[in-house]
């Protein structure tokens, strides 16, 4: 063994020190998937030696300044919760009691670690020269108000975050049956489909019990799962295809573990009764390899990097864009409040607005309509357009007339100054032009000069509209080719 790894005992270094020593010896293996099985074996061996040396359980861990959560039976999330930098003994003891209580009530390891960090920050505040609190009796309402004020000034306020939905261009590649068939493991293929179609968090999907389908009075299938973030059971509707795939997975699991009570996605290793599930890291690693096999690319041709949680954002955004009511979306995603669901609605509005501002808009005379997205009336103009899209949409464009006004043009939109249209309606314009020319020919044959004249104006406007919109599309294609 290299001198970089030579040591008298596995316990002479902590896990981080062993990792650093491994990286120093093998500098090209600093990320998962680069032949790091030796490093994993080293860390595993250290943990086992430490367990044999020190034991495990609360009697061992509670007195320590850093709890090793795996010794408490917690294998997911951060490996430790540290109280080492809490300098007040009385506060450290309270922090430990609070953390143990939260752990026993089902709080996740990640949340516990964040709570310990928050108390550590409070400890530093209490120890500062301007505060200098030495005992619990000195912590009163006034002190807490001072801390909150200082904390607010210290931490930059995070802006409102948008959901990280995947572009439909990317989703089309991911949902392609040929891409899904490139999964090497049918169980992981099904996990992917459930994440895409049902919007579950990865942890909730991996924890699904083998009996996870229930039916309502109409015999419609639902996926029953435990929402671990909210600590409650939840249901999400599924289609017959997903139900059939789950049934196949259930048969595979039951045939391998006929006497046990397995989970739907059991690990294939060291799992005699089928109750040990596939790990987060295992699925995420397999996801990265699948993306490479499928050669998924974004709009600029770059390889796509994503997280499983983005499928949840994508489903929420899709539902809002389909005009599904927010309350329905909230229930499908099992959000605790409307606040998160409103992010998807806001994204939908801003996405539609961005496309609207980018599109070339043409009026009935074939003239380009300008809408300055940064102008003083931009928000008001968009609000009017949004209302018009929802309540006054025409088969070939949109009406810009405010709702409080009465249209004086007798629905003759192609001769109306309030009419506006975009290239998405070109097929309708071509179809209407053909119909209009037929009407003109029939009117002339029957001697209906007035009807023919009115429709000639419509046909002339259609020619201008089509010409302008098609020229705009050609300009966009040329610009895209140049870039």
Image (spheres, grey):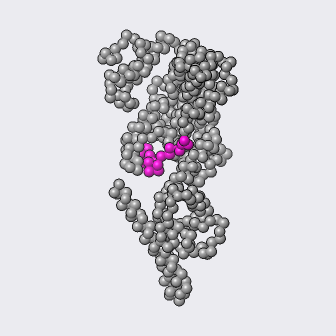
Which of the two residues, 117 or 29, is positioned nearer the viewer here?
117
Which image quadrant for residue 417? bottom right
Which of the two residues, 258 or 159, is positioned nearer the viewer here?
159
Which of the two residues, 103 or 342, is positioned nearer the viewer here?
342
Q: Position of residue 305 (x, y in %)?
A: 42, 41
In the image, what residue occupies the spot 56% across and 13% down? 63
In the image, what residue occupies the spot 53% across and 89% down? 447
Residue 295 showing in the rendered view: yes
Outermost residue, left side: 2
Which image quadrant for residue 262? top right
Which image quadrant for residue 338? top right
Q: Position of residue 385 (x, y in %)?
A: 57, 61
Count every numbered label the image shows and give the total. Answer: 0
In the image, what residue occupies the spot 57% across and 56% down? 379
Q: Tell me: residue 40, above or below residue 482.
A: above
In the image, what residue occupies the spot 62% across and 16% down? 134
Query: Which quarter of the rendering shows the N terminus?
Result: top left
130 lies left or right of 255: right
Residue 259 showing in the rendered view: no
Outermost residue, front side: 130
104 lies left or right of 441: right
Query: Which quarter of the rendering shows the C terminus?
Result: bottom left
| Magenta residue check for 472 | no
Q: Position of residue 272 (x, y in %)?
A: 49, 24
| Magenta residue check for 165 | yes
Outermost residue, bottom side: 447
What stretch of residues is rendered in magenta? 159-181
Q: Position of residue 245 (x, y in %)?
A: 51, 42
Which of the two residues, 132 or 106, is positioned nearer the viewer here?
132
């Amino acid at each position: 063994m290299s001198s970089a790894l030579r040591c008298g005992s596995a316990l002479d270094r902590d896990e981080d020190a062993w990792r650093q020593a491994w990286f120093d010896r093998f500098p090209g293996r600093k990320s998962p998937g680069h032949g790091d099985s030796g490093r994993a074996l080293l860390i595993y061996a250290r943990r086992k030696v430490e367990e044999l040396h020190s034991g495990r359980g609360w009697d061992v861990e509670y007195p320590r300044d850093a709890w090793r959560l795996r010794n408490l039976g917690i294998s997911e999330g951060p490996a430790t919760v540290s109280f080492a930098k809490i300098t007040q003994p009385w506060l450290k003891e309270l922090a430990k009691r609070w953390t143990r209580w939260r752990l026993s009530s089902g709080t996740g390891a990640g949340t516990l670690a964040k709570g310990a960090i928050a108390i550590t920050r409070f400890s530093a505040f209490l120890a500062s020269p301007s505060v200098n609190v030495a005992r619990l009796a000195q912590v009163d309402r006034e002190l807490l108000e001072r801390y909150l004020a200082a904390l607010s000034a210290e931490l930059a306020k995070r802006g409102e975050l948008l959901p990280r939905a995947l572009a439909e261009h990317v989703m089309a590649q991911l949902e392609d049956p040929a891409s899904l068939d490139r999964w090497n493991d049918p169980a992981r293929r099904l996990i992917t489909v459930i994440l895409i179609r049902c919007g579950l968090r990865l942890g909730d999907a991996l924890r699904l019990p083998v009996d996870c389908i229930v039916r309502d009075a109409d015999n419609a299938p639902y996926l029953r799962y435990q929402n671990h973030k909210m600590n409650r059971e939840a249901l999400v509707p599924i289609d017959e295809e997903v139900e059939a795939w789950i049934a196949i997975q259930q048969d595979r699991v039951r045939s391998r573990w006929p006497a046990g009570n397995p989970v739907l996605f059991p690990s294939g290793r060291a799992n005699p009764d089928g109750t040990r599930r596939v790990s987060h890291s295992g699925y995420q690693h397999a996801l990265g390899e699948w993306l490479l096999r499928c050669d998924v690319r974004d709009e600029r041709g770059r390889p796509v990097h994503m997280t499983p949680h983005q499928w949840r954002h994508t489903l929420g955004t899709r539902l809002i864009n389909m005009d599904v009511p927010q309350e329905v979306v909230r229930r499908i995603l099992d959000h605790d409040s409307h606040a998160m669901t409103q992010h998807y609605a806001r994204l939908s509005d801003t996405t539609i607005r961005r496309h609207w501002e980018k599109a070339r808009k043409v009026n009935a005379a074939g003239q380009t309509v300008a809408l300055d997205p940064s102008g003083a009336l931009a928000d008001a103009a968009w609000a009017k357009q949004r209302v018009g899209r929802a309540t006054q949409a025409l088969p070939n464009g949109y009406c810009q007339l405010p709702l409080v006004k009465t249209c004086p043009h007798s629905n003759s939109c192609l001769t109306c100054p309030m009419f506006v249209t975009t290239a998405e309606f070109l097929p309708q314009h071509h179809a209407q032009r053909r119909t209009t020319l037929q009407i003109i020919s029939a009117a002339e044959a029957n001697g209906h000069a007035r009807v023919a004249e009115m429709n000639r104006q419509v046909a002339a406007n259609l020619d201008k509209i089509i010409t302008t919109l098609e020229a705009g599309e050609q300009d966009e294609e040329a610009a895209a080719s140049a870039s």
